[in-house]
Structure formats: C-alpha cells, structure tokens
Amino acid sequence: MDAIELLKHDHRKVEQLFRDYHAAADGTQRRAVVETLIRELSRHAALEELMLYPLAKKVLPGGAHEIHRYLAEHKAAKETLLALDKLPADDDRTGELVERLRREIEEHVREEEGGLMPQLRDAVSQRELDELGQLLVRARQTAPTRPHPHAPAEPPALSLAGPVAAAYDRLRDRLQGRPMT
Ligand SMILES: [Fe+2]
Ligand SMILES: [Fe+2]
C-alpha cells in the first residue's frame, strides 16, 4: 500500500470502531473499543503530523495555510481523546464524548480524503508515495499511542526515530530537487 492508501485504511478502521462502540454488549466492551480508538487515532495523527503534513506543506501551493487548519483539527480531536482517556471505565460522559469525537473525525476525514490526499496524489509520483508508505509502516512502530494535545505537533520538536527520519529527509530532498550526496 502507498502512503495515501495506508492512511485511508486507518480511516476505515476507525469508522468501524465507532460502529463497534454502538454494537458493544456492555460497558466493558465499550471501554475496550474506546481504548482502541485512543490508540489508533493517537498513532494515526502522529504519523500524519510527522510525514504527510510536512510533505504537503512543501509540495502543495497554499499547503502551509491548509495544514495549519488540519493541525488545529487534530488538536481538538486530541483534547477529546484525552478527556476520554481520563474517564473511569463506566462513566456516563463516555457516550457523549465518543459522539463528539465521531463528528470531529468524520469532518476531518472528509476534508483529507476530498482535498489533501487527491492533491498530494497529483503532486507526488507513485514511486514516492510507495516509499512514503514504507516509511509510515516503520514509523508506526514508535508512534505515540496516547493523545498529547499540548505537545508540539510539527517536526522537528515532534520527531521520528533516527533511521526513519534519515530516509524521510532524503525523500523530501528529492522532491525539492536538492542534490543527493
Ligand atoms: Fe488528519
Ligand atoms: Fe487522517
């Protein structure tokens, strides 16, 4: 899978988790779904912030402005994830927070899949999207599994594990036409 396919696959997985939440038989099952949502969305957000958004900023006209908005949406969703993370297992507020999260994510995913992702597909070659996909798979192993809404959401403060960072730098250099050494 290339980078865009991988990230879209995450989106579908998260949509399924929202359905699972409503289908869950009891509070224990619901909490397990909430824990999975927290983990999946925290990881997904970090991967986009590390690898997709910086690339979009570089290669898309008006990318910096767009990405600013996407990052603000991530921050809002992470606040909701953090609130969920802090709730005790069978707290009454869970359902309401899950619903807020679902609305936030639905809107954000619509924008990514309708705007950012097709634009990137046009701007970047298939080979580069494939390479980025491989880097995403490696980065996922060290991505955070909890929400950190107050931590920096952009590189270099948010950083990749060394070998992945080096490979990603080379990919970006190539996209900017920098000489390879
Ligand atoms: Fe996103
Ligand atoms: Fe996404």
Image (tube, rainbow, N blue to C red):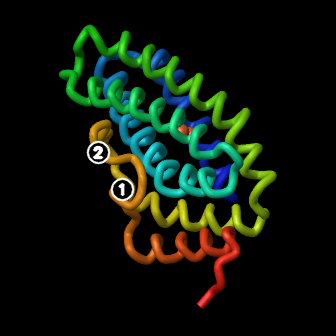
Q: Is residue 60 left or right of residue 102?
A: right
Q: Which mark is residue 151?
A: 2
> Depth check: 2 or 62 in front?
62
x then y, percent, for residue 46: 43, 49
Secondary structure under the numbered disc 1 in the rendered image: loop
Instruction: Give the structural element (helix, strand or loop) at label 2.
Output: loop
Q: Which residue is rendered at x = 40% and y = 64% of the image?
A: 160
Indicate whether 17 appears above or below 22.
below
Instruction: Report if the CB atoms under discs 1 and 2 are less than 8 Å apart.
Output: yes
- Residue hosting label 1: 158
Residue sitting farthest toward the right: 122
Q: How many numbered marks appear?
A: 2
What residue do we see at 63% from left, 51% from top?
A: 56
In the image, residue 155 above or below residue 169: above
Cα separation between marks 1 and 2? 8 Å
In the displayed structure, would residue 38 be above or below residue 117?
Answer: above
Residue 72 vs residue 46, the one in the foreground: 72
Please state which amino acid type lies under the numbered disc 1. Answer: Leu
